[in-house]
Image (tube, rainbow, N blue to C red):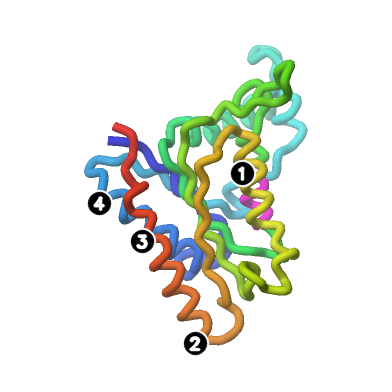
């Protein structure tokens, strides 16, 4: 038995291509690991606030010195981090918005990245504290940003996610791209099919920790 955290960030809900392909992996993990615990976190403007001063001030204050607003903000951030800490595998569904990740996913990462908790400063520089986790990232794009695409340099989605996850100590990261979704029905269908084939090849790594 293990634990999987499934995080989605598209405004499209169930129609989201990144969510659909990521859900394929979750299904693979469930089949490979009977009894696995799956926690879902759906990021929307209503469910994930931007990191604010109440949280920042609360992080540095003793619990009995926090205001009610600070206490609530810290409790929310703690819950986000606890989900990440408990997960053996994290599956992120991330559409490309204006060449990067949705602001809701950025807000989630801002809550996750906390000095002294998920990373720490040492004499040799910062050290991530979330080592040993596996992350599967499904990114969807309207166009093409991989291979020899002339727009490859405008992909600030995958490099950012690799950098922040690596900063937190997570280096076992696999990306699956759902591309061409805004070009036309035939191209979109082909891109979706290719992504679903690619996610299926990750099945052996769906085995979660006992």
Q: Which mark is residue 200?
A: 3
Which residue is at a point 65% across and 35% down the rendered structure image? Answer: 167
Q: Tags 1 and 3 in contact by the CB under 8 Å rule?
A: no
In the picture, the quarter occupied by the N terminus is top left
Is disc 2 placed on a helix, strand or loop?
helix
Say whether disc 1 or disc 4 marks the residue closer to the N-terminus: 4
The residue mark sitting in front, 1 or 4, is: 4
Q: Is residue 105 magenta?
A: yes
Question: Alpha-carbon distance for marks 1 and 4?
Answer: 28 Å
In the rendered structure, the answer to whether residue 187 lies left or right of residue 22 reads right
Q: Tags 1 and 4 in contact by the CB under 8 Å rule?
A: no
Which residue position holds label 2?
A: 186
Q: Tags 3 and 4 in contact by the CB under 8 Å rule?
A: no
**Camera-nearest residue between 45 and 183:** 183
Q: Which mark is residue 31?
A: 4
Say whether disc 2 or disc 1 marks the residue closer to the N-terminus: 1
The residue mark sitting in front, 2 or 1, is: 2
Question: Can residue 49 be seen?
Answer: no
Which residue is at a point 50% across and 63% down the rendered structure image? Answer: 18
Q: Which mark is residue 35?
A: none
x, y percent for residue 140: 56, 66
Which residue position holds label 1?
A: 108
């Amino acid at each position: 038995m293990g634990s999987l955290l499934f995080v989605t960030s598209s405004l499209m809900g169930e129609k989201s291509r990144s969510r659909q392909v990521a859900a394929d992996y979750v299904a693979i993990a469930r089949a490979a690991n009977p009894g696995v615990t799956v926690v879902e976190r759906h990021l929307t403007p209503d469910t994930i606030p931007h990191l604010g001063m109440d949280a920042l001030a609360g992080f540095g204050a003793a619990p009995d010195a926090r205001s009610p607003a600070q206490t609530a903000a810290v409790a929310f951030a703690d819950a986000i981090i606890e989900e990440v800490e408990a997960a053996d595998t994290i599956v992120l569904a991330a559409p490309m918005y204006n060449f990067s990740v949705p602001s809701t996913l950025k807000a989630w990462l801002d809550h996750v990245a906390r000095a002294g908790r998920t990373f720490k400063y040492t004499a040799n520089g910062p050290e991530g504290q979330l080592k040993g986790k596996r992350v599967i990232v499904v990114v969807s794009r309207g166009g093409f940003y991989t291979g020899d695409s002339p727009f490859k340099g405008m992909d600030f989605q995958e490099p950012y996610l690799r950098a922040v996850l690596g900063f937190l100590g997570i280096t076992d990261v696999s990306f699956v791209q759902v591309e061409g979704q805004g070009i036309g029905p035939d191209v979109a269908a082909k891109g979706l099919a290719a992504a679903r084939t690619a996610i299926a090849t990750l099945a052996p790594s769906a085995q979660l920790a006992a």
